[in-house]
């Protein structure tokens, strides 16, 4: 599930900006198609008028789109996973257009092999910012929904999973530490780098 919206405060409509002939979101989606392990790609967007143009664009590109709560992104993920009957969710944000599908496949292999509820490469960052992803079970997502969470925890989806000692976790580390590099899209300078 990719969380996406056009209402970014720092860089307006950043995922609809074009690099060459493709938008940032198209670049991300095309890169994910190279994964050998991902079964389905769904974009979860807010159900607001502001995101109607994004919805139309994604539908025109023949992607599954789920519309849900704008601010409670945790609920958006939960409702989306429930609707599509997803057992294990990969969380990717739309401001990571240079995501590495091979890295995600490695994460999926580790997730399955270790019988855990949560895996990411962000618990102890070692990859460039912008190659971030998280994999978690529906069970861990439901556990998060059942807790009394702060506004921040509802907005950032996995904060409860990360801090909870009830959820079995694992971090995927790079052999070298590249966490000082930025390949994410938050500011104009990031767009120029990408």
Image (tube, rainbow, N blue to C red):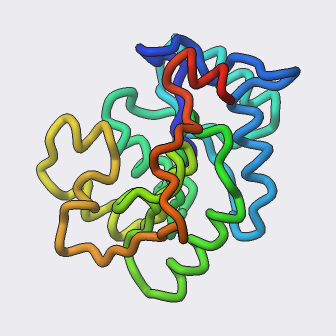
Give the quarter of the image for residue 10: top left
Q: Residue at x 46, y 61 (%)?
A: 121
Residue 28 pos. (x, y %): 70, 40
Q: Is residue 66 visible?
A: no
Residue 84 pos. (x, y %): 57, 56
Rendered position, 151 above or below 39: above
Number of marks in the rendered image: 0
Q: Is residue 47 visible?
A: yes
Rendered position, 142 above or below 5: below
Left or right: 74 with respect to 42? left
Left or right: 69 with respect to 14? left
Q: Residue at x 48, y 69 (%)?
A: 173
Q: Residue at x 60, y 16 (%)?
A: 52
Q: Residue at x 33, y 67 (%)?
A: 140
Left or right: 141 with respect to 114? left
Residue 59 pos. (x, y %): 75, 30
Rendered position, 147 above or below 70: below
> Which residue is farthest right?
21
Q: Quadrant of the C terminus?
A: top right
Residue 118 pos. (x, y %): 39, 69
- 166 or 147: which is nearer to us? 166
Rendered position, 47 above or below 135: above
């Amino acid at each position: 599930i990719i969380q996406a919206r056009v209402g970014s405060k720092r860089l307006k409509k950043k995922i609809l900006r074009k690099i060459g002939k493709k938008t940032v979101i198209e670049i991300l989606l095309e890169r994910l198609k190279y994964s050998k392990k991902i079964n389905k790609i769904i974009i979860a967007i807010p159900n607001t008028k502001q995101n109607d143009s994004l919805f139309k664009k994604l539908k025109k590109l023949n992607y599954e789109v789920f519309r849900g709560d704008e601010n409670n992104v945790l609920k958006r993920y939960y409702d989306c996973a429930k609707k599509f009957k997803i057992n294990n969710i990969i969380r990717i944000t739309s401001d990571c257009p240079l995501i590495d599908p091979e890295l995600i496949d490695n994460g999926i292999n580790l997730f399955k092999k270790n019988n855990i509820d949560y895996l990411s490469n962000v618990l102890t960052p070692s990859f460039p910012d912008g190659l971030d992803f998280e994999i978690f079970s529906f069970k861990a997502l439901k556990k998060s929904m059942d807790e009394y969470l702060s506004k921040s925890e509802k907005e950032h989806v996995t904060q409860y999973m990360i801090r909870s000692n009830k959820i079995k976790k694992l971090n995927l580390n790079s052999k070298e530490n590249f966490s000082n590099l930025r390949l994410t899209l938050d500011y104009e300078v990031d767009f120029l780098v990408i």
